[in-house]
Image (cartoon, helix red, strand yellow):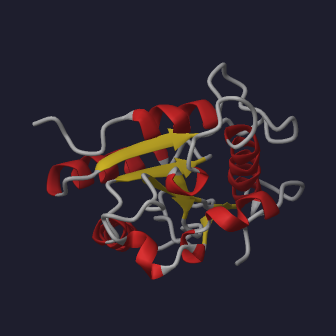
Amino acid sequence: MSGLFEIDADMAWHSLPWQGFEPSSEVLPRMAIQPVCAFVNRGNDVPLNREYEVVWKQIEVACQSFFSGENQPSNLHSSFRILPSFNRVPNLVPEILFGTSLPAASKALFEIADSVQKANVRKIVFVHANPILGPWLDTVARELRIYSDMRVFTIQLEFGSSEAGVVAEERTLDALLREVIAFPANPPF
């Protein structure tokens, strides 16, 4: 699968056998990570897949940090699974290439979340690096929280820090993922 770095190959959604999605399974992931990447025309000197590279690089760094050291979870494979990148974002600005309509993109994310929920996973995280997508993803997440019994989170990654391999702000992606995993799977109400 393109986009998965070597460190993430075992964490890919498709690598878990179907028995792993049973509610009683010890390897049932506690959450799914859905990268959302847009192809954006930012000029001649920036590649179209820049956001894709930023998101996957930071996921790679987060996985390396998440699965090393003394804070390592007891069961690595039950922590999270990474879904393939979602690239059919809505055409919110003219610079977004290969986009689709707003209703079609929202419906596609609803269907992905529904599939994740049917696989007995109750948390999904939308990870993106485009501030233009933030309000749309927040709206989708809010609607998913209302119409399903899932916990839905959005994380916007810092764009300028992928070369250094760390998020520019104090809280790194792996720290945010640890918080999300620790969050209760079912709403308290």
Q: Is residue 170 left or right of residue 90?
A: right
* Position of 30 relative to 74 (above/below): below
Query: What quarter of the picture does the N terminus occupy?
Result: bottom right
Task: Give the farthest residue toward the left.
Answer: 189
68 vs 96, nearest the viewer: 68
Q: Is residue 42 left or right of residue 92?
A: right
Task: Give the farthest residue toward the top.
Answer: 170
Q: Is residue 71 left or right of residue 179?
A: right
Give x and y (percent) for residue 120: 31, 65
On the image, which quarter does residue 110 sit in?
bottom left
165 vs 80, nearest the viewer: 80
Q: Is residue 101 visible?
A: no
On the image, which quarter does residue 7 sit in?
bottom right
Give x and y (percent) for residue 143: 23, 52
Give x and y (percent) for residue 70: 70, 29
Kindly identify the residue that appears in the image at 67 percent across and 35 percent down: 158
Kindly identify the residue that appears in the image at 52 percent across and 54 percent down: 80
Give x and y (percent) for residue 177: 54, 39
Q: Is residue 177 left or right of residue 181?
A: right
144 vs 28, nearest the viewer: 28
Kindly identify the residue that appears in the image at 60 percent across and 75 percent down: 15
* Position of 99 relative to 124 (above/below): below
Query: What quarter of the picture does the C terminus occupy?
Result: top left
Q: Is residue 33 visible?
A: yes
